């Protein structure tokens, strides 16, 4: 009977400690991944929200203008192009008068210091319709180091009101 008891062996204290250590390392790794994902999600959500609000603000500003409003005020530093056909949504080719740069808190900034870039394009569909597209993208690599930087693009059609 003693011989049978010696052959039945369980886990030793050392084996249990090693198993707990492996489990602890795995749990700590998962906690770090979770913390990183929460921070990245928060930053992305903040920037995505700001791009959406900024795009909506510009779209509301442009759609509130009269269909024939094409005033250009070149005496100010801010050029108001109204609903003049032009502009570009491509980040590499901003068109003067159809682009605005903003800092992290929403205030205006220079192109080199901008955290957000807002561009718009207006095109004629017909004599009575204009397509208005507004795009806002985050350019700050420091605040969102991983993944795609958020951007928002809105498109609408403005129709001439019957006279």
Image (tube, grey):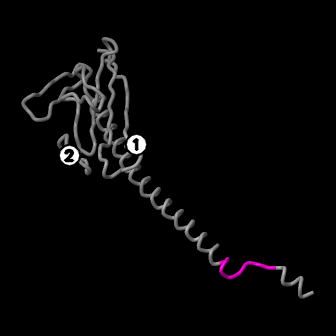
Query: Taking 134 as reference, is 103 above or below it?
Result: below
- Residue 159: x and y in percent read 34, 19
Residue most extreme to the front: 3
Which element type, helix, strand or loop, lies under badge 1? loop
Q: CA distance from mark 2 to mark 1?
A: 19 Å
Query: Taking 117 as reference, is 40 above or below it?
Result: below
Tell me the tag on residue 148.
1
Which element type, helix, strand or loop, lies under badge 2? loop
- Residue 141: x and y in percent read 31, 48
Q: Is residue 80 magenta?
A: no
**Horizontal side, residue 22 vs residue 52: left or right:** right
- Residue 52: x and y in percent read 36, 41
User: Which residue is more in the foreground, 97 or 158?
Assistant: 97
Q: Quadrant of residue 65?
A: top left
- Magenta-tinted stretch: 9-16
**10 Å neighbourhood of mark 2: few (<14), some, or many (≥20)?**
some
Q: Residue at x 44, y 52 (%)?
A: 41
User: Which residue is more in the foreground, 18 or 43?
Assistant: 18
Q: Earlier in the sequence, mark 2 or mark 1?
A: 2
The quadrant the N terminus occupies is bottom right
Query: Taking 23 as reference, is 45 above or below it?
Result: above
Q: Quadrant of residue 51?
A: top left
Tell me the tag on residue 113.
2
């Amino acid at each position: 009977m003693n011989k049978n008891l010696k052959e039945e062996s369980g886990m030793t204290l050392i084996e249990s400690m090693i198993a707990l250590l492996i489990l602890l390392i795995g749990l700590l790794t998962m906690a770090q991944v979770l913390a990183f994902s929460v921070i990245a999600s928060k930053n992305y959500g903040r920037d995505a929200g700001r791009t959406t609000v900024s795009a909506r603000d510009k779209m509301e500003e442009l759609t509130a203008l009269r269909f024939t409003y094409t005033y250009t005020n070149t005496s100010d530093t801010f050029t108001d192009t109204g609903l003049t056909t032009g502009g570009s949504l491509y980040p590499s080719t901003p068109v003067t008068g159809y682009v605005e740069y903003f800092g992290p808190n929403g205030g205006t900034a220079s192109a080199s210091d901008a955290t957000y870039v807002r561009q718009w394009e207006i095109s004629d569909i017909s004599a009575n319709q204009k397509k208005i597209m507004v795009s806002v993208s985050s350019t700050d690599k420091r605040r969102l180091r991983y993944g795609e930087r958020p951007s928002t693009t809105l498109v609408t059609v403005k129709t001439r009101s019957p006279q």
